Image: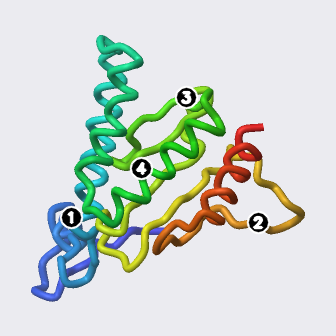
Amino acid sequence: MSVVPRKNPQGRKSTMADTRKSSKRTDEAVEGFTDEERAAMKERAKEVKAARKGSRSSKADKEGEVPAKIAEMPDHDRVMAEKLHAIIKANAPELSSRLWYGMPAYAKDGKVLCFFQGSEKFKTRYSMFGFNDNASLDDGNMWPTAYALEELTAEDEKRFGELIKKAVR
């Protein structure tokens, strides 16, 4: 069996450079990440880089990052984030607070268990409180892992307290 070189439309033999040129993607063909998504990825990269360098700061300094990030939020998100932070600290003091993709998050044994995403983070119409797969929320074959929030009522606060206790088990 002989191999016949392919010819391109101009009648020339194809080269590796021609192949590389033809495989380039155009901006029109591929929709990229939003500005908000890119910003979150950059924040996460900074968090990982800081963790790799070793912890020169104390645990108290790291715990202070979350309240500082919450304080930067717009009023609507800030109020909910402050309430959730207090609920988490009251119901699961063993969780450590940290930033995760630039969002307030709470970890158990170094793994993020739950997080708060303000509506301004990705320009959504509601804020969100979510749990990762290491949260012990299993309830049959299906259970919620994220909650859309427009505001927190006293009943909601009580429910989140119960969910946090269950998630930490």
- Asked whether, in this view, residue 57 is left or right of residue 159, the answer is left
Q: CA distance from mark 3 to mark 2?
A: 24 Å
In the rendered view of the protein, which quadrant contains the C terminus?
top right
Q: How many marks?
A: 4
Q: CA distance from mark 1 to mark 2?
A: 47 Å
Mark 4 closeness class: few <14, some 14–19, many ≥20 residues within 10 Å = some
Q: Are marks 4 and 2 in contact (CB under 8 Å)?
A: no
Earlier sequence position, callout 1 versus callout 3: 1
Q: CA distance from mark 1 to mark 4?
A: 52 Å
Residue ID at (36%, 39%): 66
Earlier sequence position, callout 3 versus callout 4: 4
- Asked whether, in this view, residue 128 is left or right of residue 108, the answer is left
Type of amino acid under label 3: Gly
Mark 3 closeness class: few <14, some 14–19, many ≥20 residues within 10 Å = few
Q: Name the residue carrying label 1.
A: 20
Earlier sequence position, callout 1 versus callout 2: 1
Q: What mark, if any, has residue 110 been given in the picture?
A: 3
Helix, strand or loop under label 2? loop
Figure coloring: rainbow
Is 95 above or below relative to 126? above
Mark 2 closeness class: few <14, some 14–19, many ≥20 residues within 10 Å = few
Which residue is at the far bottom?
9
